[in-house]
Image: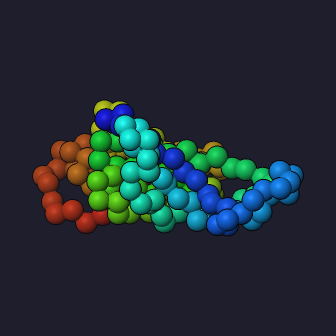
Amino acid sequence: PDHRYLYVNSRAWPEGCVVSDPLQPPPIAEEIELRVLDLKTMKEAKRALRAHRAYTPSEEFNFIFLDVSRDFVASGAEDRHGYIWDRHYDICLAKLRHDDVVNSVAFSPAEQELLLTACADSTIKVWRSPRTARLLHGEKPRLRRRLFSC
């Protein structure tokens, strides 16, 4: 949104690891780290966001695409969930269930509280915050319980 920060998903190799043969890479971490790079200083901006998992071995690959809105960061994962974090406070706000790997997520450019998740089983789910769901149906605002629901 402000184009100052670059968000990237990564899976680490063991610390101090040296790859001597690219055809036999070391085991890769199961935890996906969502890292934030400050493009102004060219340094890692804050601690990595963690919560989502991947299980593809080192010699294979699987792409997990993320998206960023004004207030949120979302990512898919191989653990059959999409995740939403608060971009400013670095806390996981929602874990969105699917039946297979969630490969991609996308916020609506018009409404950041509307998220689409795309799954390896060819399903796409639309998630709305309770606030946007109530506005859509013309209901009066209520207290917030869950951030997003399907």
6 lies left or right of 143 = right
Q: Which quarter of the figure has residue 85?
A: bottom left
Instruction: Give the residue at the far left of this rendering.
Output: 140
Q: Position of residue 28 (x, y in %)?
A: 70, 62
- Observer-nearest of 78 and 114: 78
Q: Residue at x 67, y 65 (%)?
A: 16
Residue 55 seen by the camera: no
Q: Which quarter of the figure has residue 143?
A: bottom left
Q: Residue at x 62, y 58 (%)?
A: 11
Q: Quadrant of the N terminus?
A: top left
Q: Residue at x 44, y 41 (%)?
A: 42
Task: From this view, report whether residue 60 is shown above or below residue 13.
Answer: above
Q: Residue at x 25, y 43 (%)?
A: 136
Q: Position of residue 108 (x, y in %)?
A: 37, 37
Q: Position of residue 53 (x, y in %)?
A: 58, 64
- Observer-nearest of 113 and 89: 89
Q: Quadrant of the C terminus?
A: bottom left
Residue 141 seen by the camera: yes
- Observer-nearest of 138 and 31: 31
38 lies left or right of 53 = left
Task: From this view, report whether residue 9 is shown above or below residue 69.
Answer: below
Q: How many marks?
A: 0
Type of colouring = rainbow
Q: Position of residue 29 (x, y in %)?
A: 65, 65
